[in-house]
Image: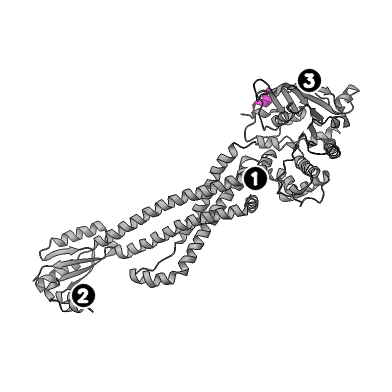
Amino acid sequence: MGRSRVSTAFRPHFRPEGHFDRSASHKPILVLEGVMKVYRADAPVLRRVDLTVERGEFVFITGPSGAGKSTLLRLVYRAETVDEGRILFCGRDVARLTDESIPHLRRNIGVVFQDFRLVPYWTVSQNVAVALEVMGLSPRVVRSRVALALERVGLDGRGEDLAGVLSGGEQQRVSIARAIVTEPAIVLADEPTGNLDPVLALDILGLFEEIHEGGTTVLFATHDRSLLEVTPRRLIVLDDGRAIEARAGLSALGGALGGTLGPDHGVDIDVRDDELLEAPLH
Amino acid sequence: MFSRALRGIRQSLGTQLLSVATVALALFCMAGALLLVENAGAMVRRWGAPVRMTVYLADGASGSGVEALRSALAALPEVESARYVSPADARASLGHGDDALADAPVDLFPATIELRLVPAAMTPSRLGAVADRVRRLPTVTGVETYRGFTDRLRAMLTGGRAAAGFLALGVLVCVFAVVSNTVRMSLQSRGREIEVLRLVGASPGYVRAPFLLEGAFLGVFGALAAVTLLGVFFFGFRYQFDQTLGLALGVRPVFLSGWVVLGLLTGGGALGALGSAAALQRGLNGAPT
């Protein structure tokens, strides 16, 4: 994974007015600062979670069921909003995005779920193409990029099959193709192997590894401990609503060994650029 | 967007067809009422225009006096022609084919002057003013303007229009409710689709547009079916209409004008889109993001 590949894949275009924020490419892709999320006052799901994810990182997030893994991911793509603290995606506070900006945020984030979230009566191609169609791309571009994405996930030639008749592993591949077809800045995977047998789970993890090798940042939430042992990626454990750095990733290890393997985690990088954050938000 | 809307319609074709049929039935009733009102209007225009006035003359009015009066009346700007009808002429006219009337004494029939009025120059108030002036003339005993008949026709037409208005209101509510509920069902059955669209960054307009189009399609197709059905009935039975009503009332029935048909189609479409918008307002606001 080289720096140059990471920077070309990164296209922060989630501002409706289409301004390119050059300074954002020098910031960590995701920063959580003191994030609190409370559904029941006596049992907060997330308690002042601090987390920084650099571009091109692969981060496992684990913890028992109900630890807040899914909630954390939902906060990132603004399906929910934080109760306290802030989440900076490409340097911008996602909680303060206007309603018009949220779709643009989501076009920069690929999301993969345990239950695939496919439209069963659509074909495989339609399920993948929808991510490009909402961006208004021409049908010719959509067709070619969908074909490429399906090829990447090993579903070449299955485009006309109905998604509902595919096996679980195949459906998850469609879901991954949909998540990566837009070449998003980050892919969030919420228990993507939860519905699959161990062999298929490893296959899917391998697919995420390939996507990551292409320069995409991956946040992989799972409670499957066996997957965590397959590759020595950075590991965040959510426990009692708190995020604990349980294992440093390859890049951090590389940094400790001489800084040859990639960017630092950047946990100490200060991204509180208030001037940048204030301007285009409501 | 059109293809997405059509894809949505195809997906629940049975429900959509049922909705179109319901909308068509409701609009058929409304279009039928409009057709009746339009033809009743033509009949009122045909029969209700103040084109005649009968001036009854006093018994024993002299020939020169009557002629002077006829000439004076004929010279009025509202009068197209004035014709003297003597008692003998009246008896001959009314007794034609009726022996009892033909044998009746001639002095039973009053002498009259029949005025044909200029329709373009005549309004109900002006007709009243002319009748008052004529009534004050010395040899005149009475004036018949036939307004009672035209007033009754107009009252019937006004009542018909009001009934059609109420019917239209009911039909509008019905179409609105049918489309709104169809789109709500569509929203429920396509919840996953909406969820996916939002997940991949579809704007609210992108999510809503196919449903709005779907509602508009329902309204337009319903109106089209209603007009087609009415046309089939009308032109299929037109010969009978011509033979009976046409001959009896002196008016030929006409179908809805192109503008009314266009109004029904666009109105149906607009109402469908409104019903859909209402369903989206209720159905999408509480949906998960």
B189 or B257, nearer to the observer: B189
Q: Is residue B267 above or below residue A265?
A: below
Local SS, label 3: loop
Measure the alpha-carbon separation of dots 3 and 2.
Answer: 115 Å
Measure the alpha-carbon separation of dots 1 and 2.
Answer: 76 Å
Disc number placed over residue A268 in the picture, else none: 3
A188 or A198, nearer to the observer: A198
Q: Quadrant of residue A73?
A: top right
Crowd rating for badge 1 (residues with CA inside 10 Å; few <14, some 14–19, many 20+): some
Quadrant, the C terminus of chain B: top right
- For residue B249: magenta? no
What kind of secondary structure does the magenta stretch mostly adopt? Answer: loop
According to the picture, the residue beneath numbered tag 2 turns out to be: B94
Query: What chain letter is assigned to the residue under label 2?
Result: B
Measure the alpha-carbon separation of dots 1 and 3.
Answer: 45 Å
Label 1 vs label 3, nearer the camera: 1
A74 or B131, nearer to the observer: A74
**Residue at the image position 40 percent from the left and 52 percent from the top:** B165
> Residue A157: x and y, percent?
81, 51
In the rendered view, does B264 fall on the left or right side of A281?
A: left
Magenta part of the protein: which range? A262-282
Q: Quadrant of residue A26?
A: top right
Q: Is residue B25 above or below residue A72?
A: below
**Residue at the image position 64 percent from the left and 36 percent from the top:** B288
User: Is residue A18 visible to us here?
Assistant: no
> Residue A93: x and y, percent?
68, 27
Local SS, label 2: helix
According to the picture, the residue beneath numbered tag 1 turns out to be: B190
